[in-house]
């Protein structure tokens, strides 16, 4: 793939798609920076024990694995990515209403799992954004600018809406979710599918996912992402619970995470020269090494200022990691499998690790406390070893 081609001039429809993509990233960032981040606190506030809340999270990530695979395949096969997003938002809106108004315990549990399953629309949004602005040398603006919007609004959700939860109570979380779902739906109306390069499914009849996994180095890449995600999941799944246990307010928790979010945003804005200069697999090894250091340090300190400083490593462990993974997919995986590849990335980095870690962590955290995060550090070391092997092996676009 030629990485030095210039981007063509944008038509009126292209501009609408760009505005829509920025709007979707911004709204989604608000949703998961607030509702997604504080959902477990909301469950605990309703009297649901931690081990049950963690199990619900684990079930959610398990169901999401299948769901985003189906949605990614649909988006690749039909090219109707706008419709795929809108259907999920409508279903999510209905499920949140059920969650609010049907008091039956098992119905509530089912609606909770269903809601957080169907609103996982980020892989399709990523596919749209890469189609509009690839990560490539020669273009001043790229896909990373969309990710910057996501990072900024995620921070606003954490701090701003987290402050609202502190003032009004966590009970208002469902109403916030409904408002943000409506906002995402509204900006999708600007999207014009006919002006985005349509994806045709691979001619191989085995299916898109099997086509991807048939290549050895692709399996190695996704295994690396899986191990990296497992190491990170202990932190991401229990960081808010840990901060609550340390006595921090929701505002303080949001501020700590905000420091890391700022570093993530800075990488999305200014990290493109690094991505262009170094091979992706070498950068992924750096991410894994820094992740191991970060999770180990996180388990050793309890004061606000030190934890804030440690969180600055988030710029590398998340910002650089996500950017490099997206670039790696762009270089090595054809457009006809783009949505599926992005779905697989989210599955391996988020959903499979959370499926494993949430129920285990719900048991381990009360027993081990902060020492549980050392497990993540050890897994990150294993990911480092695999990353070194992949960097030596080199897929076609890396040679």
Image: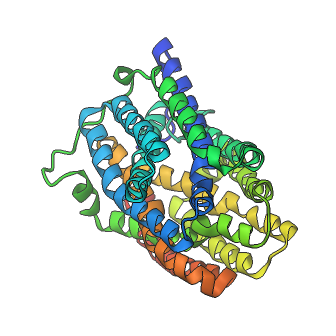
Q: Nearer the viewer, residue 183 or 26?
A: 183
366 relative to 190, above or below: below
Residue 355's quadrant in the figure? bottom left
**Is any atom of residue 287 visible in this view?**
no
Across and down, in percent, residue 281 comes to 51, 64
Q: Residue at x 64, y 38 (%)?
A: 149
The N terminus sits in image quarter:
top left
For the view shown, which residue lies furthest in the bottom direction? 367
Across and down, in percent, residue 209 comes to 26, 55
* In this picture, residue 63 sits left or right of residue 44: left
Q: How many marks?
A: 0
For the view shown, which residue lies furthest in the left direction? 205
Across and down, in percent, residue 363 comes to 53, 81
Q: Residue at x 69, y 73 (%)?
A: 294
218 relative to 149, above or below: below
**Is any atom of residue 241 visible in this view?**
yes
Q: How is the image coloured?
A: rainbow
Q: Nearer the viewer, residue 333 or 194?
A: 194
64 relative to 23, above or below: below
* In this picture, residue 307 sits left or right of residue 232: right
């Amino acid at each position: 793939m030629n990485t030095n081609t210039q981007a063509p001039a944008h038509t009126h429809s292209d501009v609408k798609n760009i505005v829509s993509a920025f709007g979707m990233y911004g709204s989604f960032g608000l949703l998961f920076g607030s509702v997604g981040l504080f959902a477990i606190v909301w469950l605990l506030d309703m009297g649901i024990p931690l081990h049950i809340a963690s199990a619900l999270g684990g079930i959610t990530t398990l169901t999401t694995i299948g769901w985003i695979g189906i949605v990614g395949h649909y988006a690749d096969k039909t090219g109707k990515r706008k419709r795929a997003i809108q259907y999920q938002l409508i279903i999510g809106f209905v499920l949140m209403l059920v969650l609010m108004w049907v008091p039956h315990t098992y119905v509530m549990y089912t609606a909770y799992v269903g809601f957080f399953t169907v609103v996982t629309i980020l892989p399709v949004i990523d596919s749209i954004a890469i189609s509009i602005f690839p990560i490539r040398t020669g273009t001043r603006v790229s896909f990373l600018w969309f990710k910057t919007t996501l990072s900024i609004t995620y921070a606003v959700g954490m701090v701003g809406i987290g402050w609202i939860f502190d003032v009004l109570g966590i009970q208002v979380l469902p109403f916030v979710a409904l408002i943000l779902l409506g906002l995402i739906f509204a900006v999708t109306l600007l999207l014009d599918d006919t002006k985005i390069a349509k994806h045709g499914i691979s001619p191989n009849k085995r299916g898109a996912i099997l086509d991807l996994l048939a290549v050895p180095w692709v399996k190695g890449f996704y295994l690396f992402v899986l191990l990296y995600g497992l190491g990170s999941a202990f932190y991401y799944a229990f960081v808010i619970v840990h901060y609550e246990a340390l006595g921090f307010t929701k505002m303080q928790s949001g501020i700590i995470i905000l420091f890391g979010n700022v570093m993530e945003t800075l990488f999305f804005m200014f990290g493109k020269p690094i991505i262009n200069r170094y091979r992706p697999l070498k950068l992924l090894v750096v991410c894994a090494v820094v992740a191991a250091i970060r999770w180990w340090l996180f388990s050793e300190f309890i004061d606000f200022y030190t934890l804030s400083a440690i969180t600055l490593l988030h710029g590398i462990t998340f910002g650089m990691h996500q950017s490099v993974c997206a670039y790696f997919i762009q270089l090595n995986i054809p457009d006809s499998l783009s949505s599926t590849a992005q779905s697989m990335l989210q599955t391996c980095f988020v959903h499979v690790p959370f499926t494993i870690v949430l129920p285990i962590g719900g048991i381990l955290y009360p027993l081990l406390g902060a020492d549980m995060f050392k497990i993540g550090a050890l897994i990150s070391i294993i990911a480092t070893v695999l990353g070194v092997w992949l960097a030596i092996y080199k897929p076609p676009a890396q040679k």
